[in-house]
């Protein structure tokens, strides 16, 4: 709950024009993505999810020709080296560790979003 | 004159006349006879003369045709004539050249030649002159000469004649004979068997060195020749273990005078002798006997030790816990030991003659047996495992180590295999493998679990921090100083909590053996740490320009140095802080040291600091886990860690890493 609040609050704080669509777990996310309309510009993925875990979800994304192009950034508390290496192997666009401090969190998200804003993938 | 007288006278005159006539007639006859005789004599004289000249010419022919060389010379040594044999012997031809015998004489024999010639002149003959001569081609020959003088009518010597026999070959033969006799004598003298040759009166004819040695006779063997031996046995009986038995034996042999071979005698010093007795007979006459004593002690000892060895090994084979199997080149069983019978469940008689490779292995492993047997026939030793079934049909696993078996000629006649039932061992191994696999899995799970738990524990902390931050920003200007202070205390507590969770995670994974055995260049580790650590400007770091290369997990070594260095930096209270790394190389390990001039640690805490959660300083960065992790890593690499410290002066941590 609070994670969603954090993200929403961050986006509003940054006065960004981004639309956030939230999925509580991988299945929900897959349903969202299945419509193929309104595909997100970037996906922020937490590894620690119930049922299907983040890495499995990432594999599904990267094996789907319609979805594999969407930049996926891991946003997680886990700095398990094995997980990091595995994510990069499957294919991710970034790996952000959630900091303890909210202020740091805001600044990390701001940087990530502003970076991917310049990348204009939608038209491609 | 009476008539009568006249008559008488006339008659006497008549008688006288008649007598004279008769006498005249006789004379006439006689003279005719004489004439005839003298005529006869004339004839026979002529006959005689002829026969003399015939004989002498015959003689000359004989000399010329004689096989031996014949030579006539004047008294100055000039050869007057010689026959073909002499020509051939000396190599000279008188028709072509003159020859003086001095040319023929071998220098060393010249005095003997001279003396012999003087003797010839004096006595008229000499015989058996034996010397060397030169042939014309300088070849040396041995000759034997019989010579005599030749006289003229007035008995004056005018020449000498001689018959020369070439005895070179005989001489060589004689020399060889002497040589071989000498050799034989030397041989006997130095023979390794004691020899004693006695004649029929028990006098010594010949004995040798070894005999003197064995019977402890302190003289050279040649001095014993001629000695009487009748008391010899009595004198030397004490050299033998059973003196009386020795005497009896000798006496009995002498009485029977029959050949004895290999009679064994033991001497007091342990020497074992073998005695031969050989009687010598010439026709039916007893000429003496030959005693031979051989020292067979060594021989006997060898045989004994050989037997002992054999006994020893057969006992080992019979009793050893390994199954032994000997097969011929057709894999037919020749020999098994007790253990093999136990292992296989068969009795010995059930196995002998059977083909081992067919009897035991289960079908799929028969191929192994065939292959290994082939290798062994090529002279290769090998060991391998096979699955078998014993007589009861129970599957077992055997470890077989086999080697080819050779005969005395070095040919392969089969092979010998040693069998060990490793079924239990194999089962244990399998169990061990399974346990290890399980352990690995649960370790991994534990590691994952630690990560998940730390993640799950950290998430609420983030949420709390976010919430506080929002409260602060939503109520900006509405909160009093005390509340803000309390909020910042909550924040720093959250930080401590977060550090604690990270450290526990690090500690739980620090001790886990990752199995990584990489070559780690500590120079690279140091470079990494220099980038990673925030070193305040007032602290100078000294690192050796060349750090060693060790084996292990690079992340663990980095963590080890990182924790020690960050402690050293953290607890610096001096204006000019020093942190220094150093190391010493020892034969089996490296000893490292990390020195600082910080606050120091009191002696009573030295043991406690390595224990988990024993932080000496209660600040938010100290969780009391850092040094526990260090200790865990040092333990992992079979090292030790200790420290020297003076409160207020500084601390030096020492630790070793096994090479």
Image (cartoon, helix red, strand yellow):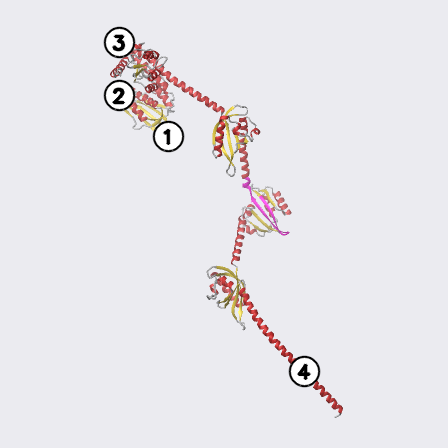
Q: Is residue B646 left or right of residue B196?
A: left
The image quadrant where one finds the N terminus of chain A is: top left
Residue B235 placement (x, y as % from top left)? 59, 46
Magenta stretch, residue numbers: B274-301
Rendered view: B22 above or below B78 = below
Of the numbered discs 1 and 4, the one sitting upstream in the chain is 4
Check chain identity for marks 3 and 1: say if they share one. Answer: yes
Residue B323 visible to an observer of this rendering: no
Q: Residues within 10 Å of mark 3 (few under 14, many from 20)?
A: some
| Label 4 with label 3: CB-CB less than 8 Å | no
The image quadrant where one finds the C terminus of chain A is: top left
**Mark 4 or mark 3, whichever is nearer to me:** 4
Residue matched to label 4: B25
Q: Label 2, secondary structure: give it.
A: loop
Residue matched to label 2: B536
Front-most of residues B106 and B255: B106
Task: Give residue B472's mark.
Answer: 3
Q: Label 4, secondary structure: give it.
A: helix
Alpha-carbon span between mark 4 and mark 3: 220 Å
The subunit letter for the residue under badge 3 reads B
Of the numbered discs 3 and 1, the one sitting upstream in the chain is 3
Of the numbered discs 1 and 2, the one sitting upstream in the chain is 2
The subunit letter for the residue under badge 4 reads B
Residue B142 visible to an observer of this rendering: yes
Front-most of residues A99 and B383: B383
Alpha-carbon span between mark 3 and mark 1: 62 Å
| Label 1 with label 2: CB-CB less than 8 Å | no
Q: Main secondary structure of the magenta part?
A: strand
Instruction: Residue lying at the far left in this picture: please name it.
Output: B477
Q: Label 3, secondary structure: give it.
A: helix
Front-most of residues B368 and B439: B368
Residue matched to label 1: B587
């Amino acid at each position: 709950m609070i994670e969603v609040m954090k993200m929403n609050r961050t986006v509003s704080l940054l006065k960004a024009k981004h639309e956030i669509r939230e999925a509580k777990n991988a299945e929900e996310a897959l349903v969202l993505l299945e419509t193929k309309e309104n595909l997100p510009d970037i996906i922020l993925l937490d590894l620690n999810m119930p049922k299907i875990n983040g890495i499995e979800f990432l594999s599904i994304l990267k094996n789907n020709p319609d979805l594999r192009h969407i930049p996926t950034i891991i946003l997680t508390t886990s700095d398990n080296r094995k997980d990091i290496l595995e994510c990069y192997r499957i294919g991710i666009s970034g790996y952000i560790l959630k900091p303890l401090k909210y202020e740091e969190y805001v600044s990390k998200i701001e940087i990530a979003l502003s970076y991917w804003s310049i990348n204009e993938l939608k038209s491609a | 004159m009476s008539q009568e007288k006249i008559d008488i006278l006339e008659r006497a005159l008549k008688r006288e006349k008649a007598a004279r006539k008769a006498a005249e007639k006789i004379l006439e006859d006689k003279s005719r006879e004489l004439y005839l005789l003298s005529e006869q004599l004339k004839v026979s004289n002529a006959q005689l003369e002829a026969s003399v000249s015939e004989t002498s010419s015959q003689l000359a022919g004989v000399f010329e045709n004689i096989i031996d060389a014949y030579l006539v010379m004047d008294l100055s040594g000039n050869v007057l004539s010689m026959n073909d044999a002499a020509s051939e012997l000396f190599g000279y031809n008188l028709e072509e050249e003159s020859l003086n015998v001095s040319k023929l004489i071998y220098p060393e024999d010249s005095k003997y030649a001279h003396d012999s010639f003087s003797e010839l002149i004096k006595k008229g003959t000499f015989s058996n002159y034996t010397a060397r001569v030169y042939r014309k081609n300088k070849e040396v020959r041995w000759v034997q000469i019989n010579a005599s003088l030749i006289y003229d009518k007035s008995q004056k010597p005018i020449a000498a004649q001689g018959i020369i026999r070439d005895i070179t070959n005989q001489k060589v033969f004689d020399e060889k004979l002497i040589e071989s006799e000498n050799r034989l004598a030397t041989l006997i003298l130095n023979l390794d068997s004691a020899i004693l040759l006695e004649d029929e009166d028990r006098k010594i004819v010949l004995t040798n060195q070894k005999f003197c040695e064995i019977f402890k006779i302190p003289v050279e063997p040649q001095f014993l020749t001629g000695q009487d031996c009748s008391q010899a046995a009595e004198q030397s009986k004490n050299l033998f273990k059973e003196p009386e038995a020795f005497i009896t034996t000798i006496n009995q042999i002498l009485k029977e005078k029959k050949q004895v071979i290999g009679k064994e005698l033991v001497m007091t010093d342990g020497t074992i002798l073998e005695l031969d007795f050989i009687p010598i007979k010439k026709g039916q006459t007893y000429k003496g006997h030959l005693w031979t004593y051989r020292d067979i002690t060594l021989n006997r000892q060898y045989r004994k030790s050989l037997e002992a060895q054999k006994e020893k090994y057969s006992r080992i084979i019979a009793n050893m816990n390994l199954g032994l199997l000997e097969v011929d080149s057709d894999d037919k069983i020749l020999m098994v030991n007790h253990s093999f019978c136990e292992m296989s469940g068969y009795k010995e008689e059930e196995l002998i003659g059977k083909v081992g490779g067919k009897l035991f292995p289960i079908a799929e492993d028969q191929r192994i047996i065939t292959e290994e047997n082939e290798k062994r026939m090529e002279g290769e030793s090998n060991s391998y495992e096979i699955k078998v079934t014993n007589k009861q049909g129970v599957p077992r696993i055997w470890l077989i180590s086999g080697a080819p078996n050779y005969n005395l000629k070095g040919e392969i006649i089969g092979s010998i295999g040693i069998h060990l039932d490793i079924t239990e061992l194999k089962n244990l191994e399998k169990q061990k493998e399974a346990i290890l696999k399980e352990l690995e899995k649960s370790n991994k799970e534990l590691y994952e679990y630690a990560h998940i738990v730390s993640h799950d524990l950290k998430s609420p902390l983030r949420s709390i921090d976010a919430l506080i931050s929002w409260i602060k920003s939503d109520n900006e200007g509405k909160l009093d100083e005390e509340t803000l202070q309390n909020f910042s205390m909550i924040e720093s507590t959250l930080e401590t909590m977060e550090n604690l969770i990270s450290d526990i995670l690090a500690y739980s994974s620090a001790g886990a053996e990752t199995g990584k055995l990489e070559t780690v260049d500590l120079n690279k580790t140091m470079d990494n740490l220099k980038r990673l650590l925030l070193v305040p400007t007032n602290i100078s770091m000294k690192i050796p320009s060349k750090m060693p290369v060790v084996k292990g997990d690079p992340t663990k070594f980095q963590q080890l140095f990182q924790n020690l260095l960050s402690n050293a930096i953290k607890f610096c209270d001096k204006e000019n802080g020093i942190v220094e790394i150093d190391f010493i190389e020892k034969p089996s390990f490296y000893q490292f040291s990390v020195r600082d001039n910080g606050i120091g640690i009191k002696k009573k805490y030295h043991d406690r600091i390595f224990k988990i959660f024993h932080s000496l300083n209660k600040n938010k960065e100290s969780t009391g886990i850092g040094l526990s992790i260090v200790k865990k890593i040092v333990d992992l690499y079979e090292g030790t860690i200790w420290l020297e410290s003076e409160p207020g002066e500084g601390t030096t941590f020492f630790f070793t890493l096994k090479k």
